[in-house]
Amino acid sequence: MSDNNYDCIVVGAGPAGLGAGLYAARDRQKTLLLEKFYPGGQINNTDRIENYPGYKNISGTDLVMKMLDQVQSFGGEVKTSGEAKSLVRREDGLIEVSTAKETFISKVVILAPGSSYRPLGVPGEDEFRQAGAGVSYCGTCDAPFFKDKVVVAVGGGNTAVEDTLHLVKYAKKVYMVHRRQEFRATPVLVEELMDYVNRPDSNLELKLDSVVTSIEGEDKVEKAVLENVKTEAAEEITCDGVFIFVGMIPNTGFLKDFVGLTEHGFIQCDPAYLRTEVPGVFVAGDCRIGAAMQLVTAVADGVNAAMWMKHYLRDPNWWNEPLSEALSPAEW
Ligand SMILES: Cc1cc2nc3c(=O)[nH]c(=O)nc-3n(C[C@H](O)[C@H](O)[C@H](O)COP(=O)(O)OP(=O)(O)OC[C@H]3O[C@@H](n4cnc5c(N)ncnc54)[C@H](O)[C@@H]3O)c2cc1C
C-alpha cells in the first residue's frame, strides 16, 4: 500500500473529525485527518465549556489539545494546512481526496468540515473586517483588544449571548442589537444575560427590535448605524468595534458536485448511520442536516460514523441496506 492510501480519511479536524479519528485509529484503521487550518474547529473560539461530560469547565483549546493527543497516540495522522479541495469516487469504489498539492486514496471518507461565521452583509463590514479595524466574529478571541472601549454586538442566539457576556468583561460599554424582542438562545443563557443587564452598574444595554444597517468610520470602526424594525427610526452608536454573531454556514462549497446538499448547504444523510448518497462517504458534525450544533453531538457523530464504517468495510453492500432491525444493539 503506498503512503497515500488509507482505510479512513476524515475531512476536518474539529470535534467531529477528532471523534471519528480517535475511533478509527484505535480500531487499527490507517487513518488520516485532513485539516484546512489547525485542529479544533470552532471550539477553539471558546474559553469556557461547561457542557462536555467529564469537565465542569474547560477551555476549548485545552480540550482540543487533549483530543488531538489522544488521536495521535493511537496512530491517527493529522495533516494541517491540508484543505480538501475535491473528492472523486472511482469505479473500484475507492475515494480520492485532493488538496492543492496531493491526492490521497481511501476506502472510507468521513466528512466533518463544520461551519463558518455568517456575515451580516452590511456596508462597512468587509472593509473593517481586517485585523484591528474593528469588525469581529469571535468575542472570545478578540474581546481583550477592546478593553475599556465601546462595542456593538449583533445577534440573539447562543453564540451571541455567550460572546456578549464575554465582551462585557473587557469593554467599557456593550450595546447588544437584536432584531426581535425574544432571544433564540437557550433559557439558561438568556437568564444569565438578563441578570447581567439588570444589574444597577451594568455596562450592557439591549437594543431590541433593531438591526445594524451600516458600519462606518475612516480607517477603523467609529460608529454603527441602527434601524428600529418597528418604527424605522435610525440611531447612530459611536463605538470602536462591531461583533457579529448571526449564525453559521456549512463549509461544504467544495462538496457541491460530490454529495447531496440542502439548499443551505448542509450535507444530506440518513440520520441513523450518517451515510451520504455516495457509498463509503459518511458525514459528521455541524455540516450535516439535523445537526444539534453542539460539541458533544459533533464528537458523537464522528464516533458513530467510525463505528458504522466497520459495516461498510466488511460488506460494501451494507451501504444500500435500509435502516434495519438487524443492526439493533442486541444483534451486535
Ligand atoms: C464561540 C463558540 C462557543 C461554543 N461553545 C460551545 C459550548 O460551550 N458547548 C458546545 O457544546 N458547543 C459549543 N460551540 C459549538 C461547537 O463548537 C460546535 O458545535 C462544534 O465545534 C462542531 O464541530 P465540527 O467538528 O462539526 O465542526 P467545526 O468545529 O466547525 O470543525 C470543522 C473543521 O473542519 C475544517 N475544515 C473545513 N473545511 C475543510 C476542508 N475543505 N478541508 C479540511 N478541513 C476543513 C475546519 O477548519 C475546522 O477545523 C461553540 C461554538 C462557538 C463558535
Image: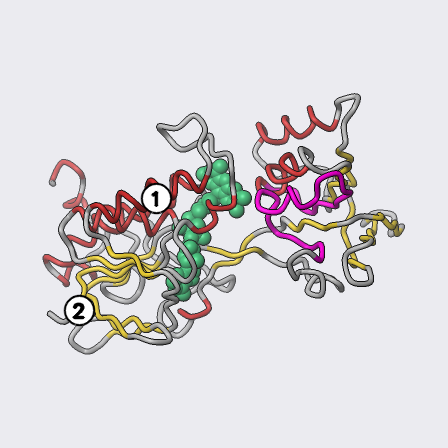
Which contiguous range is marked in magenta?
A: 133-157
Looking at the image, the residue that sits furthest to the top is 200
Residue 210 position in % (x across, y down): 78, 47
Q: Amino acid at mark 2?
A: Asp
Left/right placement of residue 234 relative to residue 244 reads: right
> Which of the two discs, 1 and 2, sits closer to the camera?
2
In the rendered structure, find residue 309 and report the number of the disc placed on it: none
Query: Is the distance from the Cβ of mark 2 to the nearest ligand 1 atom less than 8 Å?
Result: no
The image quadrant that residue 54 belongs to is top left
Residue at (83% x, 47% y) in the render: 230
- Camera-side residue: 50 or 169? 169
Quarter in which the C terminus is drawn: top left
Mark 1, residue position? 299
- Camera-side residue: 318 or 8? 8
Quarter in which the N terminus is drawn: bottom left
Task: Mark 1 or mark 2: name the one nearer the start of the chain.
Answer: 2
Residue at (22% x, 62% y) in the render: 108
Give yes or no for residue 19 being in the magenta stretch: no
Mark 2, residue position? 3
Q: Is residue 15 visible?
A: yes
Q: Is residue 79 above or below residue 247?
A: below
How crowded pointer 1 is (Cα within 10 Å; few <14, some 14-19, many 20+) is rated as many
Q: Secondary structure at mark 2?
A: loop
How crowded pointer 2 is (Cα within 10 Å; few <14, some 14-19, many 20+) is rated as few
Q: Amino acid at mark 1?
A: Val
Q: Secondary structure at mark 1?
A: helix
Residue 279 position in % (x across, y down): 24, 65
Between the residue at mark 1 and the residue at mark 2, the CA separation in whole angstroms equals 27 Å
Q: Is residue 148 above or below residue 116?
A: above
